[in-house]
Image (tube, helix red, strand yellow):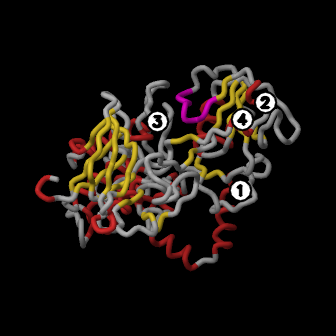
Amino acid sequence: SSMGKQRICVIGAGASGLTAIKCCIDEDLEPVCFEKSHDIGGLWRFEEEGTSDGATVYRSTYINTSKEMMAFSDFPPPKEAANYFHNSKVMQYYRDYADKFNLLKHIKYKREVLSCKKMNDFESTGNWFVTTKNLLTDKTSVDVFNGVIVAVGHHAVPHFPVSQFPGADKFKGKILHSQDYRDFRGFENKNVVVLGVGNSGGDIAVELSWHSKQVYLSTRRGTWVFNRLGPYGMPRDFLVITRHRAFLNWLTPSSVIQKSVESQLMEKFDHDHYGLRPDHGPLNQHPFINDELPHRIINGSIMIKSNIELIFDDGTAVEADAVIFATGFIFQFPFQNDSIAKLNGTDSQLYKYIWPVGMAKHTLAVIGHVHVLGAVNPVSEMQCRWATRVFKAYQYRLKGPGKWAGAREAIMGQQSRMFCPLHTRATSKRSKSKNKLVF
């Protein structure tokens, strides 16, 4: 390493990988990032069908968390930007972040990590052998690192259970995973079954409902539907994810909170009548956020159905031209030995979802390997700051390690940045009181 700095291997240059590089630099470590594809951004870099090196968003994807809630702690979003970014704006934010902190020079593209193995002297040094393959030359190389940050996310390996559905091998239509969906083209005037009610399944079903003959949204368990907009048309997460609300939730019995949230959601539309009500409470699931789904159901463009086999298990059948499996992804890091940490499947053996247990030296950290209530960016940043010996977020940059002179201004400017893109026309009745939020 240059000038005696510890060398840290960062695997992946998506959202988690970028902040990992930044945090390494902040702690005077020497990061070397290996990225399998040709560019940064990971999941959020949209690419046309057949050109992606892994998971990618579809053409019309917008973020489900508002810009203030998805921002890194020392890089506030532009005040003029819309509160909910299109995927292209998310990518621009990442590029601006990388440019500001000069991160790109630490990234090696088209480099696949084949294995991470402990060195023979790991018990005393904590060092790793990292084997990589150059996808352009097909050559492999082995490097020694003092630490490893795994930042590949959990959208790399699709869960595609086609074999669990009898008759799939005889189906004459198109079968694909949501990872391979780009836009509505090719599905016009067709009967389409979307299997799975996660955020991807809901978004795809809504988009197709404007172009396809009929969309059937198939779900085993149902879901509670949240909106992006909260009271007074403000971003819901901006109002909900606050310290004040967290303190109130700590004081209030969970059953009372569940009942209150359920009542609010049922007031928007009756989940029973719409065939969506699940057996679990609204806070016992990863938030399903969709503004249009109930409108597309009530006009018949989308029909909610139960689980699919040869026919739907409620006894009804449809003629489908295409089936889209929006069945999520599997946590799987093929370069990592299960003897270090069981990471395959949907569970893991990681302390605080970061640290493999039982290791003599804690020199490997897994970043972003968690479903969070909100955006992964600030969570990954906190994890990286902890992994590089500092554990704090945006508001914690006021003092202590990693403090930032602009922290107070950024915090106090959150509300004005949220309102700025909305105030494009002056109104005589705009009340100052409604522009003042109390947390």
Horizontal placement of 33 versus 271: left or right? left
Q: Secondary structure at mark 1?
A: helix
Q: Indicate whether residue 212 is drawn in magenta.
A: no
Query: In the rendered structure, which segment of residues is drawn in magenta?
Result: 176-183
Q: Nearer the viewer, residue 73 or 437?
A: 73
Mark 3 or mark 1: which comes first in sequence?
Answer: 3
Instruction: Indicate the amino acid at tag 1.
Output: Met
The residues tagged by marks 4 and 3 sit, at their Cα atoms, a distance apart of: 29 Å
Farthest residue, direction left: 3
Q: Mark yes or no: residue 328 visible.
A: yes
In the picture, residue 211 is in which quadrant? top right
200 horizontally vs 117: left or right? right
Q: Residue furthest bottom?
A: 251
Circle 2 — which element? loop
According to the picture, the residue beneath numbered tag 3 turns out to be 54
At label 3, counting other C-alpha atoms closer than 10 Å, the crowd grade (few under 14, some 14-19, many 20 or more) is some
Q: Could you tell me how far apart the alpha carbons at marks 2 and 1 are, in whole angstroms?
A: 37 Å
| Real-space CA distance between mark 3 and mark 1, rounded to the nearest whole angstrom | 38 Å
